Image (cartoon, helix red, strand yellow):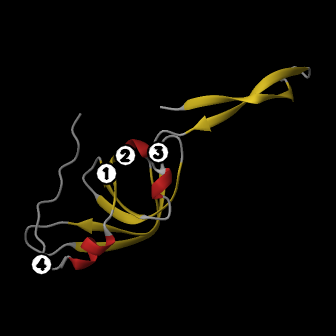
Amino acid sequence: MIFFEVKEDLKLKKTWRGGFGVLPTLRMATTTGLESLVDQIISVITNDGRNIVGVLKGFDQATNIILDESHERVFSTKEGVQQLVLGLYIIRGDNIGVIGELDEELDASLDFSKLRAHPLKPVVH
């Protein structure tokens, strides 16, 4: 959901008909809560069950996100977790199921070669 706040200062802006009118300046107030996670390592679980980890570099009002230094973690019950390098990666907001901050200390202590898990199933609507 997007909210707009009206600033107190009013400015003259040219209208599409060529005249001038007084319009309030609008400022977008984001409610996603992602501002505090910019430049932090996050984990994203997509609607199709993928787990992508990377540094959050940016996002927009549709929760489209940009990750840098990203990789996908592919879980298996037979092998350890495979980490596929993705690099700079964009994820559409409508494909995001969950976004969470990654605990770097805990993450570094895990031995992904010994970790076994079932892959996540896609979200079914």
Estimate the x, y position of residue 74 in percent, counting from the top left.
Answer: 23, 66
- Closer mark to the observer between disc 1 and disc 4: 4
Estimate the x, y position of residue 82 in percent, counting from the top left.
Answer: 23, 74
Residue that label 3 marks: 63
**SS label for mark 2:** helix
Look at label 2 and name its amino acid. Answer: Asn
Q: Give the alpha-carbon distance from disc 1 to disc 3, as whole Å.
A: 12 Å
- Residue 7 falls in which quadrant of the image? top right
Residue that label 4 marks: 114
Question: In the picture shown, does residue 29 fall above or below 40?
Answer: above
Count of numbered marks: 4
Question: In the picture shown, does residue 23 fall above or below 78?
Answer: above
Q: Give the alpha-carbon distance from disc 1 to disc 4, as whole Å.
A: 24 Å
**SS label for mark 4:** loop
Quadrant where the C terminus lies? top left
Look at label 1 and name its amino acid. Answer: Thr
Q: Is residue 124 left or right of residue 29?
A: left
Q: Give the alpha-carbon distance from disc 1 to disc 2, as whole Å.
A: 6 Å
**SS label for mark 1:** strand
Q: Earlier in the sequence, mark 1 or mark 4?
A: 1
Q: Is residue 40 left or right of residue 26?
A: left
Q: Earlier in the sequence, mark 1 or mark 3?
A: 1
Residue that label 1 marks: 46
Residue that label 2 marks: 95
Q: Earlier in the sequence, mark 2 or mark 4?
A: 2
Look at label 4 and name its amino acid. Answer: Lys
